[in-house]
Amino acid sequence: MNHDAFSLVYSMRQLSMVVLSGLLLVGCTPDPNESNWIDLFNGMDLSDWRTNRAEGSFTVKEGLLVAHSLDLRSHLFYVGNAKEPIAFKDFELIVVAKGEPDSNSGIFIHTDYDLRDELGHLANGYEINLNTSPKVTRKTGSLYDVVDLSEPLLDDTEWFETRIRVEGKRIQVWLNGKSVVDYLEPENPDRKPNRKGRLLKPNGGAIALQAHDPDSVWYFKEIRLKQL
């Protein structure tokens, strides 16, 4: 092979590698540093968040948001500069978190302040479960009581990323970039009587974190959102 032919083949191979690299990047977790992503947690305080009850169940320590219920089940809602929770309809949410062993928590979407019982369960919206207990059947990443994961997919006592995408009637969940839930809400969802509010709201709803009980501790270091 002469020099010109070798150069042509080499150039074509290089071009193929560039094209292939671009294709491999399609569908990867988006860069949270893009300008259209906003940080919901500032790493300093809870000035943009509001607790619905059991005040003090959420704190900021060493730059981390800590969920640890003092007594009652409590939820922390993102309110921004408003007094009431901000409603998000179509969005992507990235949460980087980890839990202590045998600890329960959750990420709520399309929710609000309404409770369905005295135990403090939220009446409306969906929960993406966070639970490090080996005894719990709904593992981290489950769309609670809708699409439940029966096997652990990672060590959730170490830092990991949950990515949630809501678009129209579709809810998707990824754990560390791996797709674990892809759910399309039907026209008339079949729900248990105590879960009848587990629906996507037409105008969107709040984002909230859960402090489940005094024996559970979860840490959050990144909470970022992009509206679609």
Image (cartoon, rainbow, N blue to C red):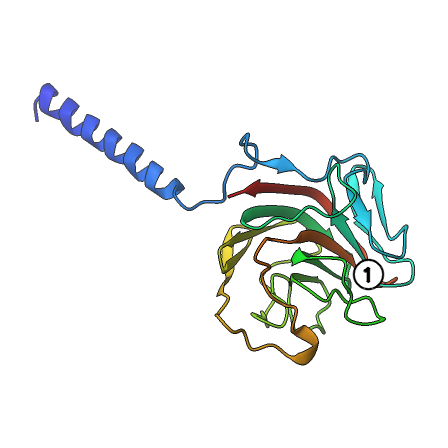
Q: Answer yes or no: is residue 178 visible.
A: yes
Farthest residue toward the front? 203
Residue 170 vs 27, above or below: the answer is: below
Which residue occupies the extreme bottom position in the image? 193
Query: Residue 101, how many percent across, how many down?
Result: 77, 61
Residue ID at (28%, 35%): 19
Seen from this angle, which residue lies furthest left? 2
Residue 104: name its quadrant: bottom right
Query: How many marks can you see?
Result: 1
Spot occupied by residue 99 in the image (x, y as percentages of width and height): 74, 55
Q: Residues within 10 Å of mark 1 (few under 14, many from 20)?
A: many
In the picture, measured across the screen, residue 218 lies left or right of residue 130, that is right
**Residue found at x 80% / y 34%:** 44
Q: Which residue is mark 1?
A: 216
Q: Amino acid at mark 1?
A: Ser
SS class of the residue under badge 1?
Answer: loop
Q: On the picture, is 199 further left or further right than 55?
A: left
Give the camera-side residue of 68 and 115.
115
Q: Is residue 33 left or right of residue 83?
A: left
Residue that extends furthest to the top in the rendered view of this protein: 3
